[in-house]
Image: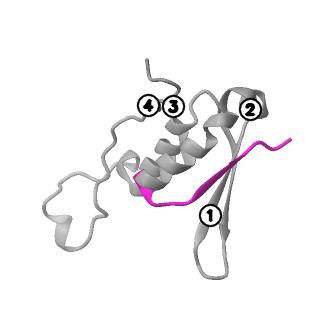
Amino acid sequence: KFSGKHVVFIAQRRILPKPTRKTRQKNKQKRPRSRTLTSVHENILEDLCFPSEIVGKRIRIKLDGSRLIKVHLEKTQQTNIEHKVDTFTAVYKKLTGKDVNFEFPE
Protein backbone atom coordinates (compact mmCIF):
# COMPACT_ATOMS: atom_id res chain seq x y z
CA LYS A 1 0.00 0.00 0.00
CA PHE A 2 2.83 2.42 0.82
CA SER A 3 5.09 0.97 -1.91
CA GLY A 4 8.14 0.41 0.27
CA LYS A 5 7.98 3.70 2.14
CA HIS A 6 8.79 3.78 5.85
CA VAL A 7 5.93 4.63 8.20
CA VAL A 8 6.62 6.10 11.65
CA PHE A 9 4.11 6.75 14.43
CA ILE A 10 4.89 9.58 16.84
CA ALA A 11 2.56 10.72 19.61
CA GLN A 12 1.36 14.32 19.65
CA ARG A 13 2.99 16.10 22.57
CA ARG A 14 2.83 19.64 23.88
CA ILE A 15 5.80 21.73 24.91
CA LEU A 16 4.93 24.41 27.46
CA PRO A 17 7.23 27.44 27.69
CA LYS A 18 9.64 27.71 30.57
CA PRO A 19 8.04 29.78 33.34
CA THR A 20 9.61 33.20 33.79
CA ARG A 21 8.95 35.96 36.29
CA LYS A 22 6.45 37.63 33.93
CA THR A 23 4.41 34.50 33.21
CA ARG A 24 4.15 33.49 36.88
CA GLN A 25 0.66 34.98 37.35
CA LYS A 26 -0.99 33.49 34.25
CA ASN A 27 -0.45 29.79 34.91
CA LYS A 28 -1.62 28.89 38.35
CA GLN A 29 -0.23 25.37 38.07
CA LYS A 30 3.34 24.19 37.91
CA ARG A 31 4.55 23.00 34.51
CA PRO A 32 4.64 19.17 34.49
CA ARG A 33 7.93 17.45 33.66
CA SER A 34 6.27 15.71 30.71
CA ARG A 35 5.67 19.08 28.99
CA THR A 36 9.29 20.27 29.05
CA LEU A 37 11.25 20.60 25.81
CA THR A 38 13.84 18.04 26.89
CA SER A 39 11.22 15.49 27.91
CA VAL A 40 9.26 15.86 24.68
CA HIS A 41 12.40 15.46 22.56
CA GLU A 42 13.40 12.35 24.55
CA ASN A 43 9.96 10.83 24.03
CA ILE A 44 10.00 11.59 20.30
CA LEU A 45 13.28 9.68 20.10
CA GLU A 46 11.71 6.75 21.99
CA ASP A 47 8.71 6.74 19.62
CA LEU A 48 10.90 6.86 16.51
CA CYS A 49 12.82 3.66 17.11
CA PHE A 50 9.82 1.85 18.58
CA PRO A 51 10.34 -1.88 18.12
CA SER A 52 13.84 -1.41 19.48
CA GLU A 53 14.80 0.01 22.87
CA ILE A 54 17.39 2.71 23.45
CA VAL A 55 20.14 1.12 25.54
CA GLY A 56 22.52 4.09 25.67
CA LYS A 57 23.09 7.66 24.62
CA ARG A 58 26.15 9.85 24.14
CA ILE A 59 26.27 13.54 23.28
CA ARG A 60 29.34 14.54 21.32
CA ILE A 61 30.14 18.24 21.29
CA LYS A 62 32.48 19.11 18.43
CA LEU A 63 35.09 21.86 18.48
CA ASP A 64 32.81 24.24 16.57
CA GLY A 65 30.17 23.84 19.30
CA SER A 66 27.74 21.67 17.33
CA ARG A 67 26.23 18.69 19.10
CA LEU A 68 25.78 15.16 17.80
CA ILE A 69 23.64 12.70 19.75
CA LYS A 70 24.75 9.09 19.38
CA VAL A 71 21.96 6.68 20.23
CA HIS A 72 22.73 3.02 20.93
CA LEU A 73 19.87 0.68 20.00
CA GLU A 74 19.51 -2.91 21.16
CA LYS A 75 21.41 -5.45 19.09
CA THR A 76 18.54 -7.97 18.93
CA GLN A 77 16.42 -5.67 16.71
CA GLN A 78 19.23 -4.77 14.31
CA THR A 79 17.82 -6.82 11.40
CA ASN A 80 14.38 -5.18 11.73
CA ILE A 81 15.56 -1.58 12.07
CA GLU A 82 18.92 -1.22 10.32
CA HIS A 83 17.44 -0.19 6.96
CA LYS A 84 15.26 2.49 8.62
CA VAL A 85 18.05 4.27 10.51
CA ASP A 86 18.47 7.01 7.88
CA THR A 87 14.73 7.69 7.99
CA PHE A 88 14.83 7.98 11.79
CA THR A 89 17.70 10.47 11.56
CA ALA A 90 15.90 12.63 8.98
CA VAL A 91 12.58 12.62 10.89
CA TYR A 92 14.23 13.52 14.21
CA LYS A 93 16.22 16.34 12.56
CA LYS A 94 13.03 17.71 10.98
CA LEU A 95 11.00 17.60 14.21
CA THR A 96 13.61 18.81 16.72
CA GLY A 97 16.46 20.35 14.72
CA LYS A 98 18.99 18.10 16.49
CA ASP A 99 21.52 15.87 14.76
CA VAL A 100 21.28 12.24 15.81
CA ASN A 101 23.24 9.12 14.88
CA PHE A 102 21.95 5.58 15.52
CA GLU A 103 24.33 2.72 16.31
CA PHE A 104 24.11 -0.94 17.31
CA PRO A 105 26.83 -1.65 19.90
CA GLU A 106 28.03 -5.21 20.55
Quadrant housing the N terminus: top left
Q: Position of residue 84 (x, y in %)?
A: 61, 36
- The amino acid beneath tag 3 is His
**Nearest the camera: 43 or 18?**
43
In the picture of the structure, the residue carrying the numbered disc 4 is: 9
**Disc number for residue 6:** 3
Secondary structure found at label 3 = loop
Secondary structure found at label 2 = helix
Residue at 66 percent of width and 35 percent of height: 83
Cα distance in 3D space between marks 2 and 1: 21 Å
Q: Which of disc 1 and disc 3 is earlier in sequence?
A: 3
**Disc number for residue 13:** none
Instruction: Assess disc 3: are there few (<14), some (14-19) or many (≥20) residues with their C-alpha within 10 Å of its C-alpha.
Output: few
Residue at the limit of the structure toward the right, as seen here: 106
Circles 2 and 1: CB atoms closer than 8 Å: no
In the picture of the structure, the residue carrying the numbered disc 1 is: 68
Residue at 48 percent of width and 55 percent of height: 93
Residue at 56 percent of width and 49 percent of height: 89
Secondary structure found at label 1 = strand
Cα distance in 3D space between marks 2 and 3: 16 Å
Q: Is residue 86 depicted above or below 22 in this figure?
A: above
Q: Which of disc 2 and disc 4 is earlier in sequence?
A: 4
Quadrant housing the C terminus: top right
Please state if 85 lies on the left or on the right of 3 as rendered: right
Q: Is residue 5 depicted above or below 100 in this figure?
A: above
- The amino acid beneath tag 1 is Leu
